[in-house]
Structure formats: C-alpha cells, structure tokens
C-alpha cells in the first residue's frame, strides 16, 4: 500500500530541479530540496519516537521548513496537528491534553514556557524558528537523506485541525489522506492549476485555507509559490508581475483596492484572484473588478470539509455568492426543525456530503454522531440559500459564530473568559460589520455595582488568556443585556444596535 497523499504530491513533480518556493529573503527551494529535507525530517521524527498514527503538534512561525515538516509527517505516517501561533499556553494545555501528541514542535523562544505542558502530556519537544534554526533542523542536518515512506491508505488520518466549539471547548476535526487529496485534485481542476502557476502565498499555514487549499493545490499541480510570512502589501504589489494566482481573505482585497498601484497594467500577468474564509463584500468585489478587470473568485469551505463550493473559473462569478457545489460534492439546504430538504430559493441549514468531508471529531463520538445525518450529510451550522442556478448564498450562521479576518471565533469562549474577570457581572459577545475584517468581535459587559472596570484593563486581562484574533475590538459597558420573555439574551438586538460601530 503506498503513502496515499504524499505519493500523489511526489508524482506531480515532473521536474525535481524546478523552483518550488521563493522566499522574500531571496531563498530558492527546488522540489528536490524540499523532498530531501522532508526525508531527513521524517528520519528525525522516527528517531524521536514518532510512530504511524501518532500526532505531531506544530506551533511555529511560517517558513519553508515548516511547510516541509508537514510533508515529513505524511511520509512517516504521523498525523499533522498545526496550531495557531497566537494560542496561549493555557489554550495549548488543552490541545496537548486532548490530542496527546508524541512530539511537539515550537519556536525556540517559547520552549521554556511550554516545557511543562509538553512534559505533562508525555510528548517530546523540538524547536524550529522562521529562519531554519532550532533543535529540529540541527538534528535534520545529521539525519539520513533517504526515507522509506510508511504505507498510508485513503482512510488513514493525515491531519487534525482544531475548530472552536460553542461550549468553549475546541473540537479536533480528523482529516484523512483522501479527504485532503480528493479536494486538492478537485480544486486543481476547477481552478485550472498547472505547473506553470506561481502562487502568492501570504496566508498562515496552520489552518485549512493556507495549508490544505493554497499549499496542497500548489503541490498537486507541481506549481511554485512565493512564500510570504504574512500579508505584506508592498511585497504583493511587487510580485504581481511575476505571479499568476493570489489566494487571500477579504481583508487582502480591501487593502489592494485602496492602492493606486493595483490596476489593469500591474495585474496583467495574473490569471486568478481567490477569496475565502470570510464573506467578501459586494462593494469590494465590484471595486476590484473596476480597478483590475479581474472578478474575484469566492468559494466556501470549512475546517471539517475543506472546500465545498466555488464560483466558476469559466462563467459568472457572482458577488455575494460562493458558487455551485464542487464536482463530487453535494450541498443541500434543509429545514432546521425537520431536516427535510428545501427547494431552491428557501433559507435553511446547509449540509454537505462528499469525499472531502472529515472523519469526525477526535475523542468525541457523540458530538460526531450529532453533526451527521443518517444519510451521511454533515450539518455545517451555516444558513444559506441555493438559487435556481445552483449558486449557494451564505445568509447567516447558526450559534452566533463570528468570522473576523478569516478566523472563526465562538462567542461562548470569549464570554467565559470575560465573566471570570473580577467585577464583571455578565457579558455577551457578538459580531458586527467591519470593513477590513468582515466582522468585528464585540462585547457588551455588565459591571457589578461598585466595580471600576474600564475597557483597556479588560482587554489587557483577556490578552493573557486568549489568542489575539479572538480579542474583542471593543468592549462596551452597558447597564443591562436585552432579553426575551424566557430570559435569553437577544444578540440580534445587540448587533442591530451597534451595526455601525466600526463604520
């Protein structure tokens, strides 16, 4: 049995000496360079005790070495577990305790503060920085240049990605080799990727968009990438004449629309601009098309499913929609109460089925069962409409999910931390429109009588417990929270009241 996903990547490489990665510092990696390092890193992982099926947790800065580490995990049969670089030690303690990784890779600067939680879960700690330094790369220099890849089949796990839950406890979405490979191949074909493409990669590689969309699609097509540490307007503008594709979140395109250098001439070499992870404003879609002549292609996916729908490469890319279902994927809209399928044009819960849909939640069989219908459809939690042409429109989200800057934030997690602050009586967290981030995380807080809390102090306290992207952009001190006759907080009223807060 071959190594299902890695073999597909390796077979897509028809010219080993061709450029795979270019870095802003002038570094150039060929495919042969990446394959060689992945073999050495796979040897290190095995030497450090990683066996097939073991989890390898990675919280490091974006780098070519970090991306190759993902390949090394595939080669030795490990389950890759990327973690947001913004997570605090308190948050990591939960992930390590739940996933029980055999190995944790962290930045050298975080090694000391993570040593205790890594040891508590029984893992080995290695380090990797964004310049190729650290103990992991030091060991790789001494490791063998060849590696006998471990057999992995389509149903074997390739990765676990944690996604927040409304209870405040994150869930580990288990993704198989075929979940990832089937979606990469579908996107390659749908978006017409070839070895001639040069992707501007400015997304993080710890979640679906940057890792499984951008990186996997590049690999499966034998294309190359300009690997940027993060969104950098100057560098992206400079790269436009040399690139062919940009994948980004709406914030990227807001910034590009504001720059006079982004026009039809500077984007003439580009063939495709893709947006996802958060809703793209129709205004941004229209402005970008007027400036560049390019219609942004918006698509829809989730941590649990990778990509489900996409506006077409050939055909109408309609602003405000995420396009039809991708080939091999079935999307339906059902009545939230009965589960019955609804006709075109009616709003309901979006459900999906296909080879891209995950295997379930790690260590949560009951939660997994609750999120799937008996006929195998996954309940997304998103509300939507499918129009007469088959285009999907996302019209809302269940359970008050906030998507800010492409990241999912569940209010309950933020509220739990707010309510623990001395002097806070109760809180409600919600999202309201934000031009740059899609939605701005916002909190309304009722303070106990006599308490002298102020917004700045509460934000500072939250900063010790939550990743930066989860922090409210504003904390509003209010006399009381709006409630219905049953006592439930009416967040819809809060959203309506503060909808222009970030105008």
Image (cartoon, rainbow, N blue to C red):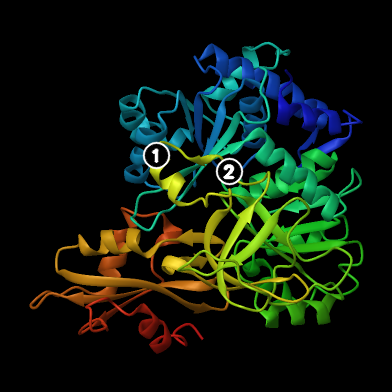
Looking at the image, do the residues carrying marks 1 and 2 touch, with CB atoms under 8 Å apart? Answer: no
Q: Is residue 413 above or below residue 95?
A: below
Q: Is residue 60 left or right of residue 117?
A: right
Which of marks 2 and 1 precedes in the sequence? 1
Q: Nearer the viewer, residue 148 or 472?
A: 148
In the rendered image, which residue does mark 2 sit on? 358
Q: Is residue 359 left or right of residue 36?
A: left
Q: Nearer the viewer, mark 1 or mark 2?
A: 2
Q: How many labels, in total?
A: 2
Q: Is residue 150 left or right of residue 85?
A: right
Q: Residue at x 54, y 59 (%)?
A: 380
Q: Position of residue 447 (x, y in %)?
A: 17, 75
Q: Is residue 336 above or below residue 19?
A: below
Q: Is residue 41 above or below residue 388?
A: above
Q: Is residue 60 left or right of residue 479?
A: right
Q: Quadrant of residue 350?
A: bottom right
> Residue 133, can we see it?
yes
Q: Which disc is residue 95 wearing?
A: 1
Q: Secondary structure at mark 1?
A: helix
Q: Residue at x 25, y 75 (%)?
A: 445
Q: Nearer the viewer, residue 369 or 274?
A: 369
Q: Position of residue 21 (x, y in %)?
A: 77, 40
Q: Quadrant of residue 471?
A: bottom left
Q: Position of residue 355 (x, y in %)?
A: 68, 43
Q: Nearer the viewer, residue 253 or 133?
A: 253
Q: Position of residue 413 (x, y in %)?
A: 34, 58
- Which quarter of the rendered picture does the N terminus lie within? top right
> Residue 24, can we see it?
no
Instruction: Quote the CA–CA distance across marks 1 and 2.
Output: 19 Å
Q: Which disc is residue 270 wearing?
A: none
Callout 2 environment at 10 Å: few (<14), some (14 to 19), or many (20+)?
A: many
């Amino acid at each position: 049995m071959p190594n299902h996903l890695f073999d597909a990547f390796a077979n897509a490489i028809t010219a080993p000496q061709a450029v795979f990665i270019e870095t802003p510092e002038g570094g150039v990696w060929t495919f042969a360079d990446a394959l060689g390092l992945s073999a050495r890193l796979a040897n290190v992982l095995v030497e450090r005790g990683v066996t097939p099926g073991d989890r390898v947790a990675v919280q490091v800065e974006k780098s070519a070495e970090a991306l190759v580490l993902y390949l090394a995990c595939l080669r030795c049969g490990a389950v890759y577990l990327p973690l947001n670089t913004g997570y605090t030690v308190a948050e990591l303690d939960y992930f390590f305790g739940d996933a029980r990784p055999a190995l944790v890779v962290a930045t050298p600067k975080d090694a000391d503060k993570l040593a205790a939680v890594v040891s508590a879960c029984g893992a080995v700690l290695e380090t990797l920085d964004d310049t190729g330094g650290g103990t992991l790369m030091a060991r790789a220099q001494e490791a063998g240049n060849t590696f006998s890849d471990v057999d992995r089949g389509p149903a074997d796990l390739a990765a676990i990605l944690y996604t927040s839950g409304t209870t405040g406890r994150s869930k580990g979405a288990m993704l198989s080799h075929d979940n990832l490979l089937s979606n990469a191949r579908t996107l390659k074909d749908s978006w017409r990727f070839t070895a001639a493409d040069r992707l501007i990669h400015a997304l993080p590689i710890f979640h679906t968009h940057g890792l499984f969309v951008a990186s996997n699609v590049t690999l499966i097509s034998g294309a190359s990438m300009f690997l940027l540490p993060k969104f950098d307007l100057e560098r992206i503008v400079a790269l436009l004449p040399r690139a062919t594709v940009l994948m980004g979140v709406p914030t990227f395109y807001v910034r590009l629309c504001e720059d006079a250098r982004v026009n039809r001439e500077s984007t003439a070499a580009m063939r495709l601009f893709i947006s996802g992870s958060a809703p793209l404003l129709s205004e941004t879609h229209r402005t970008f098309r007027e400036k560049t002549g390019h219609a942004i292609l918006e698509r829809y996916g989730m941590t649990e499913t990778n990509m489900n729908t996409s506006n077409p490469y050939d055909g109408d890319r309609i602003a405000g929609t995420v396009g039809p279902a991708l080939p091999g994927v079935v999307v339906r809209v059902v009545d939230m109460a009965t589960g019955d399928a609804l006709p075109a044009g009616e709003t309901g819960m979006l459900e999906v089925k296909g080879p891209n849909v995950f295997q379930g939640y790690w260590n949560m069989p009951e939660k997994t069962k609750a999120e799937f219908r008996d006929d195998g459809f996954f309940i997304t939690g998103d509300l939507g409409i499918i129009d007469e042409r088959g285009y999907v429109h996302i019209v809302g989200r269940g359970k008050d999910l906030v998507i800010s800057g492409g990241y999912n934030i569940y209010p309950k997690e933020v509220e739990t931390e707010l309510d623990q602050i001395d002097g806070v009586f109760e809180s409600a967290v919600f999202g309201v429109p934000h031009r740059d981030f899609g939605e701005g995380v916002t909190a309304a807080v009722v303070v106990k009588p006599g308490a002298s809390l102020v917004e700045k102090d509460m934000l500072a306290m939250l900063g010790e417990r939550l990743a930066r992207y989860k922090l409210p952009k504003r904390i509003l001190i209010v006399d009381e929270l709006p409630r219905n006759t049953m006592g439930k907080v009416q967040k819809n009223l809060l959203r309506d009241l503060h909808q222009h807060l970030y105008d």
